[in-house]
Image: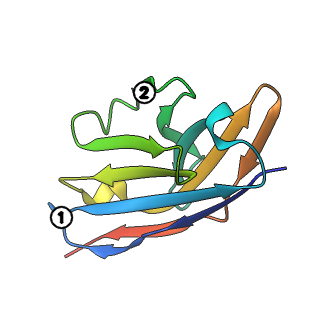
Amino acid sequence: QVQVVESGGGLVRPGGSLTLSCAASGSIFSFYDMGWYRQAPGKQRDLVAVITNGGSTNYANSVKGRFTISRDNAKNTVYLQMNSLKPEDTAVYYCNAKQAVRSYWGQGTQVTVSS
């Protein structure tokens, strides 16, 4: 069992930056692929970025060049650095830990981009 807790959301102006953190506990963090997803009101939950246990990364086209995912295995934490934020980035952001068929979600953190 893995527990994941997101933090760092908030209100930011267009063009601003925000860093989300996801702290995981309960298992061997370094074994897990970690991802960030987001869900806007009335829309499905979509992948934003993923970092594998080997450190490979992948991003949604809509955030490439603006967002950076990273992980610190010593701190059992994954980060999402978000730059040049746009109103369409507004959503609840969820952290996911995945290993084989096991998948664990956090409760989400709200990010609102508005002037």
**Three-letter residue code for mark 1:** Gly
Residue 39, position in %: x, y? 54, 54
Q: Nearer the viewer's eye, disc 2 or disc 1?
A: 2
Crowd class of label 1 (few under 14; some 14 to 19; many from 20; radius 10 Å): some
Q: Please, what secondary structure does the residue beneath circle 1 have?
A: loop
Name the quadrant containing residue 35: top right
Looking at this view, is 64 or 31 the one in front?
31
**Residue 76: image tag:** none
Give the percent coordinates (x, y) of residue 63: 31, 39
Task: State the residue at coordinates (43%, 51%).
Answer: 79
Q: Position of residue 50 (x, y in %)?
A: 50, 34
| Side of 32 relative to 58 (left or right) | right
Q: Residue at x 57, y 28 (%)?
A: 53
Instruction: Give the residue type at disc 2.
Output: Thr
| 105 relative position to 80: left or right | right
27 or 18, nearer to the observer = 27
Identify residue for label 2: 57
Residue under pointer 1: 16
Q: Is residue 72 above or below residue 25?
A: above
Q: Residue at left 17%, top 53%? A: 84
N-terminal-most mark, 2 or 1 = 1
Label 2: state its secondary structure: strand
**Position of residue 57 in the picture relative to residue 23 (left or right):** left
Marks 2/1: CA distance?
Answer: 23 Å
